[in-house]
Amino acid sequence: MALLFEPLTLRGTTIRNRVWLPPMCQYSAVDGVPNDWHLVHLGARAVGGFGLVIAEATSVVPEGRITPQDAGLWNDEQAQAWARIVDVVHARGALVGVQLQHAGRKASTFRPFHEGNGSVPAEQGGWTTVAPSAVSFPGLATPVALSDDEVAAIPHAFAAAARRALDAGFDTVELHAAHGYLLHQFLSPLSNVRTDRWGGSPENRARLLVETTDAVRAVWPDDKPLLVRLSATDWTEGGLTVDDVAAVAAVLRGHGVDLVDVSTGGNLPVPVPAAPGYQVPAARRVREVSGLPVSAVGLITSGAQAEAILAEGSADAVLVGRAALFDPSWPLRAAHELGVATPALAFVGADARVRPGESTGWPVQYERGSWN
Ligand SMILES: Cc1cc2nc3c(=O)[nH]c(=O)nc-3n(C[C@H](O)[C@H](O)[C@H](O)COP(=O)(O)O)c2cc1C
């Protein structure tokens, strides 16, 4: 048995294996409502053996969208559309999470579909962005600094979206505090130059993330895990370092966070030394300092590489993103390469369910492709 295919239990929730799909924006929603594209994207990866699929960065308020085509969870129509997708993933025995986010100064941009660059003007459906400080991300419009009351309202928006995520049937929510979006903008001294209770000291800069965590934890059931994605470094002199971020993770442990999804960068357009497994050392450090389980992500592309990351104790789960766009059945392929048995799973019809936590296996419909 490979460690990759051992179940992982967080609180009262058992995930059937440790190879998960990271959140990946599809920029294909209309008015924040996900559709058949999202259903196929996530459903195919559940069929392909992922233990947990995490739905893309999903905005808690309309002005928090990275692009006008981002998914949302600020109204019930969106929650109902997500519920259909959640049911499809569950029917294949995978669990499903949603990444909750507010893009702050990186909102209202063109999607990367060759339609334009930079900030979307108002006449094309864009809006004025908000941020901790009126400091722009290079190449984007200058945001308006949030007032004290407006910052204090952000955790409530995240909590309301989490309540809708619960109604939709999601098994976990992940707070997006990475990649230069609003919660990361508050954490980093490069984007947060406030002098009030939300800026200055590391404690003040972490206040919004901690209050958001508390607000979401208060509405998120005790038996369901809460994940946070952090950028462990800004890759910039004067920005956040791995030790700064590991210290934040240690604080979050005391506020009901169950796993840190360790990524890096995104707060400034600086070069990132991307190479196979380049973020794994940061994941290991966050795990050591915080005592929390972590997931590793970033150019993890083979089963043997993923297995080694778990075996050396660097992480408790791995996320496979782009390689899974190429191969939706990446986990089943990795299981084959690692010699792990993948039994055919019983036929799953509209009325039947694979129990959450049931082992990874080939859909009986695809068994002839399983090399078994
Ligand atoms: C198309 C695409 C969309 C992405 N959208 C998100 C997102 O919504 N939230 C997020 O935290 N990261 C996002 N990412 C980053 C991935 O989650 C992942 O961290 C990154 O691709 C590195 O992993 P990989 O090398 O396995 O792809 C996105 C990446 C891609 C390729």
Image (cartoon, rainbow, N blue to C red):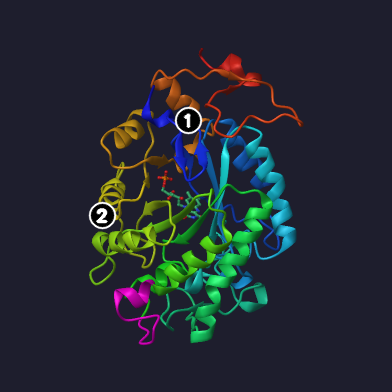
Determine the main secondary structure of the stretch shown in magenta: loop
Whether residue 126 appears in magenta in the rendering, the answer is no
Question: Above or below — where is 151 with respect to 45?
Answer: below
Which residue lies under the disc numbered 1? Answer: 331
Q: Can residue 274 be seen at all in this image of the molecule?
A: no
- Residue 136 position by quadrant: bottom left
- Foreground mark, 1 or 2, reads 2
Name the residue type under label 2: Val
What residue is shown at x 44% (from left), y 37% (from top)?
8
Image location (x, y in percent) of residue 286: 29, 53
Element marked by disc 1: helix
What residue is shown at x 28% (from left), y 52% (from top)?
282
Which mark is first along the chain, 2 or 1? Answer: 2
Whether residue 195 appears in magenta in the rendering, the answer is yes
Element marked by disc 2: helix
Question: Above or below — where is 24 with respect to 270?
Answer: above
Question: What quarter of the picture does the N terminus occupy?
Answer: top left
Image location (x, y in percent) of residue 62: 63, 70
Question: Above or below — where is 65 with respect to 80?
Answer: below
The residue segment tinted magenta is 193-206
10 Å crowding of disc 2: few (<14), some (14-19), many (20+):
some
Horizontal relation, residue 193 to residue 353: left or right:
left
- Residue 188 position by quadrant: bottom left
Which residue lies under the disc numbered 2? Answer: 289
Horizontal relation, residue 37 to residue 314: left or right:
right
10 Å crowding of disc 1: few (<14), some (14-19), many (20+):
many
Image location (x, y in percent) of residue 218: 54, 63
- Residue 187 position by quadrant: bottom left
What residue is shown at x 28% (from left), y 42% (from top)?
314
What residue is shown at x 27% (from left), y 65% (from top)?
244
